[in-house]
Amino acid sequence: MENQAMQKVQILSEFSQQTVYLMGSAFVLGSMFTLFILLILDWIRRDKNEK
């Protein structure tokens, strides 16, 4: 009985850890994508102003 409880706790712990990794990677990828879009928009705006 105690062994089953420990297995459940370990599974829940691993799931929580994977969730945190997923949230962190989504944040980093989202930030990089946003920065990339802002750089492209700035580059387009600078091209229009030079013409």
Image (spheres, rainbow, N blue to C red):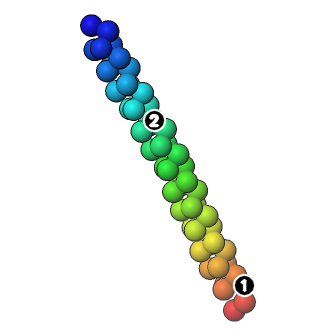
Task: Pick the residue in front: 39 or 23.
Answer: 23
Crowding at dot 2, Cα within 10 Å, few <14 / some 14-19 / many 20+, comes out as: few
Residue at position x 53%, y 46% in the image: 24
Distance from Cα at disc 1 to Cα at disc 2: 48 Å
Q: Along the horizontal axis of the image, is 10 left or right of 36?
A: left
Give the label, 1 or 2, closer to the camera: 2
Residue at position x 57%, y 67% in the image: 37
Q: Quadrant of the C terminus?
A: bottom right
On the image, the x and y values in percent for residue 4 come to 28, 14
Q: Is residue 39 above or below residue 20?
A: below
Q: Is residue 15 above or below residue 5?
A: below
Residue at position x 72%, y 84% in the image: 49
Task: Pick the residue in front: 20 or 45.
Answer: 20
Task: Pick the residue in front: 27 or 21.
Answer: 21
Residue at position x 38%, y 20% in the image: 9
The image quadrant that residue 10 belongs to is: top left
Residue 17 numbered mark, or none: 2
- The residue labelled by disc 1 is 49
Crowding at dot 1, Cα within 10 Å, few <14 / some 14-19 / many 20+, comes out as: few
Q: Along the horizontal axis of the image, is 3 left or right of 29?
A: left
Q: Along the horizontal axis of the image, is 11 left or right of 16?
A: left
Task: Pick the residue in front: 22 or 34.
Answer: 22
Badge 2 marks a residue whose secondary structure is helix
Badge 1 marks a residue whose secondary structure is helix
On the image, the x and y values in percent for residue 21 come to 47, 43
Q: Is residue 41 above or below residue 15?
A: below
Label 1 sits on what residue type? Answer: Asn
